[in-house]
Every structure is written in structure tokens, then in C-alpha cells.
Image: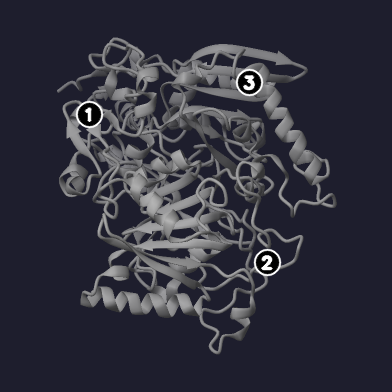
Amino acid sequence: MEAAAALEKRERLVIGPRSGSSRRRTRSLRRVDGYGGRRVAVAAAPASAPSVSMASSAVDPSIWGLLEGRSQDLSMRERRGQYQAIVYKTYIKGIELVVRAGAWVVRAGAFSSRIELFDRCPSCPERSDWEHPGPNGRELSTSKRKPFYICNQQNMFDALRARYKWEIWLSNVPHTKLVQVKGHQNWVKVSGQYLLFPGGGTQFIHGALHYIDFLQQSVRGVAWGKRTRVVLDVGCGVASFGGYLFERDVVTMSFAPKDEHEAQVQMALERGIPAISAVMGSKRLPFPSKAFDLVHCARCRVPWHADGGALLLELNRVLRPGGLFVWSATPVYQKLTDDVEIWKAMTALTKSMCWELVTIKKDRLNGVGAAFYRKPTSNECYESRGRQQPPMCSDDDDANAAWYVRLNACIHRVPTGAAERGARWPADWPRRVRAPPNWLNTSQVGVYGKAAPEDFVADYQHWRRVMDKSYLNGLGVDWSRVRNVMDMRAAYGGFAAALRDQKVWVMNVVNVDAPDTLPIIFDRGLFGMYHDWCESFSTYPRTYDLLHADHLFSKIKDRCAVLPVVVEVDRIVRPGGSIIVRDDSGLIGEVEKLLRSLHWDVRLTFSKNDNGVLFAEKSDWRPELVAEPT
């Protein structure tokens, strides 16, 4: 324990000054002893945690090198304990792995009521949660999602596909506090081996579908699945709102923090609903400006009126001009003293931001109300304000800069030129997924060197061909077992667009050092986020069914090592899940070697003209657990 504590103290993250004002601004950080540029601090395992038998775990020495290079002064036993920390965090929710990823430590001062700076992977569970089985384990349900398998490994996905929103294995997400706290609101219930999700929420006890229809009937401009396609749900809980919006042809980016309500986002992903672990703190959300058609907050407990309205101004940044903010909270419809004061503050703030209060409606069945605000489509109101508060953002404030950029309590001007992004509402869904956005023009050079509109069309056609000729049939992917998909290097989102007719959703990731194509992805009715693959992704372990990496490793190898990224892939993918890698032949070989060392089943590799394809499936393997000698 002393050695682990010493290691943790020695490897505290050191954050240096930043420079630059673009979205790609990077941090000046001291590298942590050769860990490929990833900044981590490994905490000690719980006292009850079993140790790892190095002799039987059969891990490639290159992975042992994750710690070998920084532990020369420690004994083998001490290094084995550190290896245990990495292994358990990679495979099992057992070790705190603190990663510099955005927002979790309360900071004193101007933002003392909000959270910032560090992101945490799930905290150490009880011993029972460590006991994940290997291939001969006693209960496979601890490592697999209910729609995939039952305990005897029988594949039940087809029978349960229609019920993905309803139930998951309790042993997959062994948290019951939400049942105690929110059971009366129909969030989640326990039934034997399962967690059941009746479809309710704090503001829609009688079901999400009724509430969704109530919102559409309240304002004509909602038009789910046509005009309104991409939604942001703040403080999503277990994401029933976003899950049921799929039935209205709407994709929802849901997010919530890891707070006293435990693993809300983990439950959402286990249900097959898109969600990320995030907070509204002192940094911008990892999305471009003018991205979402509608933003929703149902009792999300965010103090919108505090700190000069900084958090509501962040929603203003990511909300499309003409888009709606739906606020369903007690200040809208109750008259308690605190609610009245919050409503007054919110009214003053939204007026100063030139938001139009479209209407306030009461849902009689659920006994709640919702206020509907619309963001302006011109700058006339901003220019006519007697008091310029909140102020307009400066011209050098890039509204799309979102990676480690601090919140700025200001308003960005609304684009009005015909060729500016956001000046016009996108075409109705699904037309918008196929056609280049109107603001792309031939004077712009695309990602692949052609004129931007031509580049867009060529990319879409390319991925449709690949999907039809390879991925859907010839590659060996069992699409009946796939729900949660990630494109790790998305470009225009052509891969996700080609999957539009499949019963899946795709998280499109645009790397922070790549051309900024995420606004295009949102404009075509898809969603995604910015990320740096030299860091951990903001999700729980074992939450994605399929990862797709198109020339990702060749693009990042000059900034960070391939090995930690492959280990992160292993953390994200659930047992039985898979990855498709397209890259240079040499890197395909390197990735294959690392995946095999992690006991993945490499199903296919193919190389031609220095380009290669790899398809691999994650196994149920775990390091053998043995008792530590006393």
C-alpha cells in the first residue's frame, strides 16, 4: 500500500499553461514517466481486492512495460501491485484511474458552485464487483449485457431486441441506490436478476412517450424526427427521454455526472441508449457551436441563473439559431419561495440573452409544466439592448473552440450571411443526411483534397460501398448483436450515415488535431464529440459493442504510443464486442499483436498496397485471480 501511495503521490498530474485560441489548443503537461503522453495517477486497490498472478495471466511484455519503464526503483512485488492497478482498471471497475479529461474537482473561487478540472473513472466497488469471470467463469452475466446473453451463454438478442430499453442484468450494473431514491418516479426498479426501466422520470412519472408527445403538441416548431433531429438532454438520469425519442426518429446526446445517484450513464449505455459522463462546470462542453436543434432540461439541477448565466450561455453556444430550450422544472409551475426567486432570475437572464419565451404549458397527467424558449435568428435584439449584459463575445473568441476551453460568459453573434453556417435551418430529416450542408462551397478544400461539397459526396458514397460490399456481409460482423457503435475518427460521418438503416447508433468522434468536421456531422442529423485519443474517453468500461478506427493509429502515433490507445479500446469494448481497423499495413500488424496479447480473437486481417483491414472480437479472458500470500 505504501508503494502504491508513493506512486500516486509521485505521479500527480502537473498542469501547465495553455496557449493559442483555436479549438485545437493543447495543454503543456509534463509526461508521466513514459506512459505514451497519457497523464494518469494510479490509486491503490481496495484492501479486499484479489491480486493478479503474473505467471498465469499471459500478458504480452509490452503491456507490462506500461509500468516497467517508470518503476525501476521498486521491487517485483511492488511493480506487480502497480500492474494489478492498470489491469483491473482496464478490465474491471476496480481501480481509480484519474485522467485529465475535463471536469470533476470542485474549485474554490468564482466557480465554487461548479465542478471542474479532473474526470474520474468509476470509483472502487465492493469485492463482489471484482469477481468477473474468465472463459470458465461461474456467471457470464457480470461481463455481458442482457440483450446479448443469459447466464448459460445462450444468445437471446433477437428475442430481446425490442425490449432493449426495458431491462438489463443487475449484475452488469450492480447499483440499487437509484431504485431507493427514484423508484417512486418510475426511473428504475429491481426484479430478481434484472433492473427494469418502466420509462418514467422525475418530470414524466407516467412515461416518456406521453411526455414527448406533450412537448410536441405544445409548440408547433418541435416536429420530432423532421425539423428536430438532434437533441441534447442535460442531466439525463437513466436516459429514458433519449431512449424513447428513438421512436420519433430523433437522436439524443444525453449526459449526466457520476454523482450520488451512482451510475446513471452506465445504466443508459447498458440499455443501448447514447450517453456520456460529463458535467456543466467551468469548461465548454465537447461540442461545436450551433449544433443542437433542441436542448432539454427536466429537473437537471443546473443553476442556470448563477455566475452571470455562464452555464445557460454555454447552452446558447451549442444551440442552433431558432432552436428551442425546453426547461421542465419546479420554478416554471410552482410558487414556493425559492422557485419564485429562481423564476425571476431566469426571466431576467433569458430576456437579456434575447431568448423568446414561446409558451409555458402544463402537462395535466404528470402534473408538471415546461417553459419553451427560442434562440434568436438575427442580431437585432442584441444591438438594441440598453445594457450590454451579458456582453457580446470578442471577434477572436472561436465559438467552435471546445477542447479544454474555459467558459466565457458572453454571447456569440448569430450568423446571418447566406454562406455562413447556422444562418439557415438544415433540411428536414432524412434529407439532411445525404446532401452537403448549404454553407459548404467549392472554394473550400475538403478533408481528402477535393472541393468540400464533392469531398462530402465522395465520402458518403465510399462508405456506402464499403458497408454494402464488406461490413454488412463479408467481414463477419454479427449486426444482430450490435447496438452501441463508435467511429473513432469520423471525418464527415459517412460511416454513421451508411449505417442509418441499421438498428444502431454511432458516436462520431472528431480528433482535436484533425480538420474540424464535427459541425458538418451535426448538420447532417448525426451527433458526436471532440476527443483526444491520447487520453481516456469519457465512458464507463465495457459500454460499446463495435469500434471503427479508420487510419486512426497512423494519425496519432507521432503524438502518443499506440499501446495505451489499444488498452483504452479494450476498456471500452464489452466482451463479445469487436473492432474494425483500417490503416497502414505496418500499423495493422502492430495493433494485431497488441490485441492478441490481450486475448482478442483476430478474425480477419487483409493487406494490399500498404493498406490493411483488421477485424477482431474481444474475448471473456481475465487475468487469473489468486489470493495474496499472507
Q: Which element carries disc 3, helix, strand or loop? A: helix
Q: Earlier in the sequence, mark 1 or mark 3?
A: 1
Which quarter of the rendering shows the N terminus? top left
Q: Earlier in the sequence, mark 2 or mark 3?
A: 2
Q: Is residue 627 left or right of residue 481?
A: left
396 and 624: which one is in front? 396
Q: Check whether the beta carbons of the residues at disc 1 and disc 2 lie within 8 A of each other.
A: no
Which label is found at residue 303? none
Q: Which element carries disc 2, helix, strand or loop? A: loop
Q: Which percent across, then down, holds residue 425?
A: 64, 57
Circle 1 residues within 10 Å: few <14, some 14–19, many ≥20:
some
Q: Which percent across, then down, holds residue 359?
A: 43, 69
Residue marked by disc 2: 415
Q: Check whether the beta carbons of the residues at disc 2 and disc 3 lie within 8 A of each other.
A: no
Q: Amino acid at mark 3?
A: Ile
Q: Earlier in the sequence, mark 1 or mark 2?
A: 1
Q: Is residue 603 above or below residue 224?
A: above
Q: Which percent across, then down, holds residue 541?
A: 38, 33
Residue marked by disc 3: 588
Which quarter of the rendering shows the C terminus? top left
Q: Amino acid at mark 2?
A: Pro
Task: Name which residue lies at 25% across and 59% down.
Answer: 367
Q: Which percent across, then down, holds residue 623?
A: 33, 19
Between circles 2 and 3, the one closer to the viewer is 2
Residue 589 visible? The answer is no
Circle 3 residues within 10 Å: few <14, some 14–19, many ≥20:
many
Q: Is residue 181 left or right of residue 379?
A: left
